[in-house]
Image (cartoon, rainbow, N blue to C red):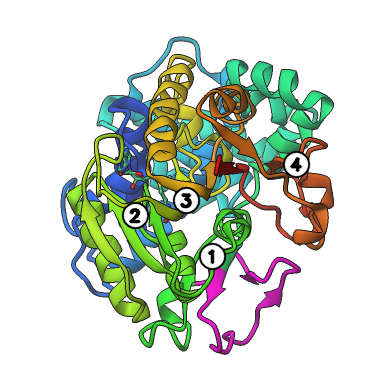
Amino acid sequence: MAAPTQNPARRAAAALLEAVLVRHRPLEEALDALPTDGRPHKVREKGEARPGAAVSLRDKAAGHRIAAAVLRRAGSLDAVLEPFIRREPPPVVRNALRIGAAELLLLATPPHAAVASAVDLVPQPFAGLVNAVLRRVAEAGPAALEGLDAERLDTPGWLWTAWHAAYGPAVRSIAAAHRVEAPLDLSLKPGAAAPEGGEALPSGTWRYPAGTRVTELPGFAEGAFWVQDAAAALPARLLDVRPGERVADLCAAPGGKTAQLAAAGAQVTAVERDPKRAARLRENLERLRLPAEVVVADAAQWSPGEGFDAILLDAPCTATGTIRRHPDVPHLKRPKDVPSAAELQRSLLAAAAKLLRPGGRLVLATCSLQAEEGEAHLGAAAALGLALDPVRPEELPGLAEAVAPGGTLRTRPDLWSGRGGMDGFFVARFRAAL
Ligand SMILES: C[S@@+](CC[C@H](N)C(=O)[O-])C[C@H]1O[C@@H](n2cnc3c(N)ncnc32)[C@H](O)[C@@H]1O
């Protein structure tokens, strides 16, 4: 069978799925590792696409889109494939079947191209199987997905149980929100004009349709804005820094929150443990022409001397609040990751409390939907002498429902659902004793 000319994109998708589902590597790392030829378009002769060969930027983007669709809906796709598979095939075949099914059922690829391309991805002995199974899926069409409990099928059981315990029936709308690709959200530098085509959200974020390429928007190279989910922009806003205040951003890269603090005129020290990520943070600040001192250090061990007026602790976490943007997260995280992330957050919180001047402010944020990485930290904060400074609903227009009665903030992907949702964050603001 002739190899379709579009197959470099499917090969890229297969490589990404192999990295995430077989080798358990993050999708972004796998994307960075894909060899590209740097050209937006590349016409290939049929059959030329070899594993490991460079792909064009366009094929990489198309492969990313296919892989993301598979990762978002893997449970549903496997349920559709199930009746046609007698014995579990090798991972390369299973992933080719998922790619074919995603193209047929979710991405509106013409059936002939979807089936032929998936067949082209597998070793010859499996070509017949993939062809036969996908022809059956093609016959059923998108109706094959109807009647499935997609929310449950596409959510690992342990996450469903935890979210049900924390949020009750809203677990279903959270899971439904994960099916949809997130929009592009931008934070603007003060005084900068928003690129055309965006929607101004009540929180100040500018929102653009999913798939918008930020680097192609006018103003990107000039540093007029940076990418930041609407919910991710809230922690720094709630710290409410003033010009000239000494502020530490303790887990800083890639720097969205550092940029907000610096744009507000604070004297910012950004601490980041990972040297590569610190380099990216520096690059971002350079593009934005915003000043901040970047320190490569473990924030749990860092002792700069004088206390800070304000500290932002955007602690590393399981990132289960960012599944809309990172559909690999449910496939990579395991239940045991939650207590270890919570432990790390507790140690960083204790270190942060020591870095505050008397009366200083601290905002703790995590982009996790797990209560252990959010609400459960309030007791530890109190034991460290940090008094909760409640967030008032009027501080966050349009988000009153995200402010808990005690004054902590809990955003979820199903909030603002008619407008494209937002990442799931826990945010709490504290004050050190005087
Ligand atoms: C949630 S991300 C921060 C996102 C960032 N605040 C922003 O808004 O762009 C967490 C960051 O903390 C860094 N990190 C993890 N543990 C750290 C530690 N002990 N000290 C300093 N940075 C750490 C990670 O490398 C990662 O870049």
What is the distance, in whole Å, between disc 4 and disc 3 at their CAs? 17 Å
Residue 229, horizontal then vertical, whole percent = 57, 58
User: Is residue 365 part of the magenta span, yes or no?
Assistant: no
Question: For the residue marked with disc 2, what is the amino acid?
Answer: Ala
Is residue 157 depicted above or below 251 in this figure? above
User: Residue furthest toward the top?
Assistant: 87
Residue 241 disc label: 1
Residue that label 2 marks = 253
Determine whether, in the image, residue 172 is placed left or right of residue 318. Answer: right
Q: Does mark 2 have its CB less than 8 Å from ligand 1?
A: yes
Residue that label 4 marks = 407
Is the Cβ of the residue at disc 3 closer than 8 Å to that at disc 2? no
> Can you see residue 396?
no
The earlier-in-sequence mark between 1 and 3 is 1
Q: Name the residue nearer the viewer: 64 or 140.
A: 64
The magenta region covers 186-212
Q: Secondary structure at mark 2?
A: loop
Question: For the residue marked with disc 3, what is the amino acid?
Answer: Leu
Residue 115, horizontal then vertical, whole percent = 47, 43
Is the Cβ of the residue at disc 1 closer than 8 Å to that at disc 3? no
Which quadrant of the figure contains the C terminus? top right
What is the distance, in whole Å, between disc 2 and disc 1 at their CAs? 19 Å
Is residue 233 depicted above or below 391 in this figure? below
Is residue 1 depicted above or below 43 in this figure? above
Residue that label 3 marks = 312
